[in-house]
Image: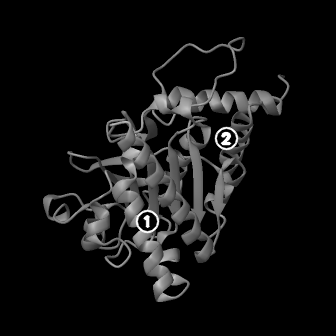
Amino acid sequence: MSEPATEPVRLRALLRDWLAAVRPPALFCDEAPEPAGLSIWEPIHLGVDEHGRPVRVTLAYRNMLLAGEPGAGKSVGLNLPVGHAALSTDCDLWLFDGKLVELGLWRTCADRFVGPDLDEAIGACEELQAEMDRRYDRLDAGRRRKITPDDAAQGIRPIVGVFDEVAYYSATVGTKTQRETFAVLVRDLVARGRAAGIIVIAATQRPSSDIIPTSLRDLFGYRWAFRCTTDSSSDIVLGAGWATRGHSAAAIAPEDKGVGLLLAEGGEPRRIKSAYLSDEQVYALADRATALRAGSTP
């Protein structure tokens, strides 16, 4: 009977499985060098479509919106781009977690973590906005349009900002002025951040027009709607008119956890099943990401 795998071996196997899902198939063996981290410039593995084909999207120069009713699998789906960003040593990871315990699983590998504190969230967004403006000044001076991987040599790399739950900061706590300030800052980051290397991923379990106004929704290149209670809620995530054309997240059965409709730029919503990471796997990947970002191995 074989001995149980040691923790370093188990972590290496887990990371190897993750890399195999994200990258084209490659030959791995026990003697192979330990795989390096991912890159934020590489496609992110989200799951499989109805035909069992892998679904991957490139997040660079894009933003992503995830929404659905409680328990539909939004948090499961959110772990995938967050996990990829955490294991990507060529980006910074800023996490905003209104519930503290959702993105908190990735806290150890985040460059900045903001919990249920609206003032702190506003301050962090203002820092991101200031960094975005500095980058645009640099691009303008160099007669360039956008940040590229080559900018890493000058210490400029993508920043992935993840917000969960958006409604907590924009509609639940604080004064009306504070909530409006936060909403305006997030909208500016989504609207102007892409070319400056600021990537926004926002998630909510309240897909309503006051949380996701059309002017904000339409700025997201990727929109992932998990089960919604009504066709109108689904349209708030995906865009007006998709439900009447046969694409409604309200048609997803309650027992189909992790199933959602993904709309990418220029396409039609397609039904996909998100990959699943258990809490144990998330913690293992977070430990690995922390070690990678520190330049060591677990």
Q: Is residue 41 above or below residue 69?
A: above
Q: Is residue 41 above or below residue 169?
A: above
**The furthest residue to the bottom:** 175
Amino acid type indicated by mark 2: Leu
The secondary element bearing badge 1 is classed as: helix
The secondary element bearing badge 2 is classed as: helix
Q: Is residue 52 left or right of residue 97?
A: left
Foreground residue among 161 and 271: 161
Could you say which disc has been placed on residue 68 in the image? none
Residue 60 image offset from top left, x and y in percent: 41, 40
State which quadrant residue 54 falls in: top left
The C terminus - image quarter: top right
Q: Residue at x 14, y 64 (%)?
A: 244
Foreground residue among 87 and 182: 182
Structural crowding at the residue carrying mark 1, measured as other residues with C-alpha within 10 Å and reported as few (<14), some (14–19) or many (≥20)? many
Amino acid type indicated by mark 1: Val
- Residue 165 shows in the view: yes
For mark 2, what is the residue?
285
Q: Residue at x 42, y 73 (%)?
A: 183
Foreground residue among 135 and 283: 135
Q: Is residue 178 above or below residue 203?
A: below
For mark 1, what is the residue?
186
Numbered marks: total: 2
- Residue 59 shows in the view: no
Instruction: Give the mark toward the camera: 2 or 1.
Output: 1
Q: Is residue 56 left or right of residue 128?
A: left
**The furthest residue to the front:** 141
Residue 293 image offset from top left, x and y in percent: 69, 37
